[in-house]
Amino acid sequence: HMSGGQLRCPIVFRGPGGAGGRLSSQHSQALEANYAHFPGLKVVAPATPADAKGLLKASIRDENPVIFIEGELLYGVRGEVPDTEETIPIGRANVVQSGNDVTLITWSRMLTAVALPAAQHMASMGISVELIDLRSLRPLDEATIAQSIAKTHRAVVVEEGWGFAGMGAHLTDVIQRTCFDDLDAPVIRVHGLDVNMPYAANLEAAVQPSVDRVVQAVQQVTYR
């Protein structure tokens, strides 16, 4: 922008995000909303080893600066990773599972730690969850979100960070602007509590999104 297009800036910034393990207020922030705020930056947040590889390759090949956020508690996660050189396009969400009753939207560690277990529990309650892993926060795959809500008519957003001015606030705005006629209930956000991260393990767990809180939110939007 400053050079009138004469210079390129193909750089990737990798770094941890979200809660650590008993790291309190110094290393437990989810800062994706901060980075996504700036035009020109791309922001990705993989949830699985396979997505981390595919998105990192795509980020390195991109001509723009990319913020690559790695869930701090995901560093020890093991999973299948393809041997091929294929990349995952930045800006394309992944429909992890199809459903009919509610759209559950999340990214990074919240997918495996909270949203998937919640979806499995709700299946036993007779609630069919469509689960979307955004993978990319900017650009945002608004089309996949809209297609899902046109089917389910309900949405719950799960984010690890704080609610005030968080990524979920923008997602809720996108949904109410583009999917208003399809919604049969208000969009509900499940996010970290509005406090600094405590040090004690039990308090640390208490302020983060949980399976129970997601289930309650889904019950609220489905009037169960």
Image: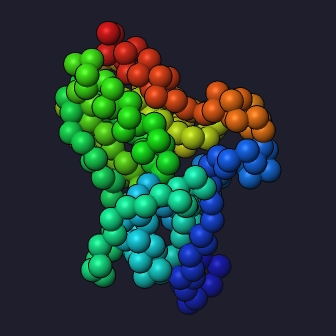
Q: Nearer the viewer, residue 120 or 90?
A: 120
Q: Is residue 193 left or right of residue 173?
A: right
One can see residue 29 in this view: no
Looking at the image, what colour scheme do you see? rainbow
Q: Position of residue 122 (x, y in %)?
A: 31, 24
Above or below 218: residue 156: below
Residue drawn at x 32%, y 9% is 224
Q: Is residue 112 left or right of residue 205?
A: left
Residue drawn at x 62%, y 84% is 3
Q: What is the number of callouts on the image? A: 0
Above or below 199: residue 221: above
Above or below 53: residue 176: above
Q: Is residue 204 left or right of residue 79?
A: right
Above or below 69: residue 164: above
Q: Position of residue 182 (x, y in %)?
A: 26, 26
Residue drawn at x 37%, y 61% is 79
Which of the 4 quarters of the picture holds residue 54?
Answer: bottom left
Q: Nearer the viewer, residue 151 or 51?
A: 51
Most extreme residue toward the top, as rendered? Answer: 224
Q: Is residue 35 left or right of residue 198?
A: left
Residue drawn at x 33%, y 31% is 119
Which of the 4 quarters of the picture holds residue 198?
Answer: top right
Q: Quadrant of the N terminus?
A: bottom right
One can see residue 96 in this view: yes
Q: Position of residue 202 (x, y in %)?
A: 68, 30
Q: Position of residue 115 (x, y in %)?
A: 41, 37
